[in-house]
Image (cartoon, rainbow, N blue to C red):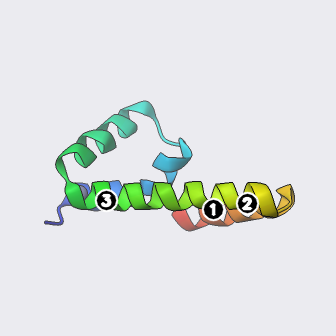
Amino acid sequence: MRRNSCFRAASRLYSYLDGEIRAIRRIRIRLHLRQCLNCERAFLFEKRLRGFIRERARVEAPPEVVERIRRLIRERSS
Ligand SMILES: [Zn+2]
């Protein structure tokens, strides 16, 4: 079931994963994830995907490329 709180959580997914939101919002999102399986799955998927990309980037890409990708992701999420 998609509710307003789902849209709110989804719109903050990237800043949440980047640690770029205030504590009170983090807590609200965490509470939502605890009671919403759909959003929890989406967040977990994105988190793992990012971890995977980060691992590969660390091995294969020079730092300026990693920084450029980070910037693109941030632009996409704002
Ligand atoms: Zn939800």
- Asked if the residue at label 2 sits under 8 Å from ligand 1, the reply is no
Task: Give the side of residue 42 with respect to residue 65, left or right.
Answer: left
Task: Give the side of residue 24 with respect to residue 55, left or right.
Answer: left
Instruction: Find residue 41 and name its label.
Output: 3
Task: Give the side of residue 8 with respect to residue 54, left or right.
Answer: left
To which quarter of the image does residue 52 belong? bottom right
> Type of residue at label 1?
Ile
Q: Residue furthest left?
A: 1
Q: Residue at x 55, y 47 (%)?
A: 18
Q: CA distance from mark 2 to mark 1?
A: 6 Å
Q: CA distance from mark 1 to mark 3?
A: 18 Å
Q: Secondary structure at mark 2?
A: helix
Residue 13 spot, x, y in % from top left: 43, 55
Foreground residue among 34 and 74: 34
> In terms of sequence position, does the residue under pointer 2 or pointer 3 come before the other?
3
Badge 2 vs badge 1, beta-carbon distance below 8 Å: yes
To which quarter of the image does residue 51 belong? bottom right
Q: Residues within 10 Å of mark 3 (few under 14, many from 20)?
A: few
Label 2, on which residue? Answer: 57
> Type of residue at label 2?
Ala
Instruction: Find residue 23 and name its label.
Output: none
Residue 46 visible here: yes
Q: Residues within 10 Å of mark 2 (few under 14, many from 20)?
A: some
> In terms of sequence position, does the residue under pointer 1 or pointer 3 come before the other?
3
Q: Residue at x 54, y 43 (%)?
A: 20
Q: CA distance from mark 2 to mark 3?
A: 24 Å
To which quarter of the image does residue 27 belong? top left
Residue 33 spot, x, y in % from top left: 27, 48
Q: Quadrant of the C terminus?
A: bottom right
> Type of residue at label 3?
Arg
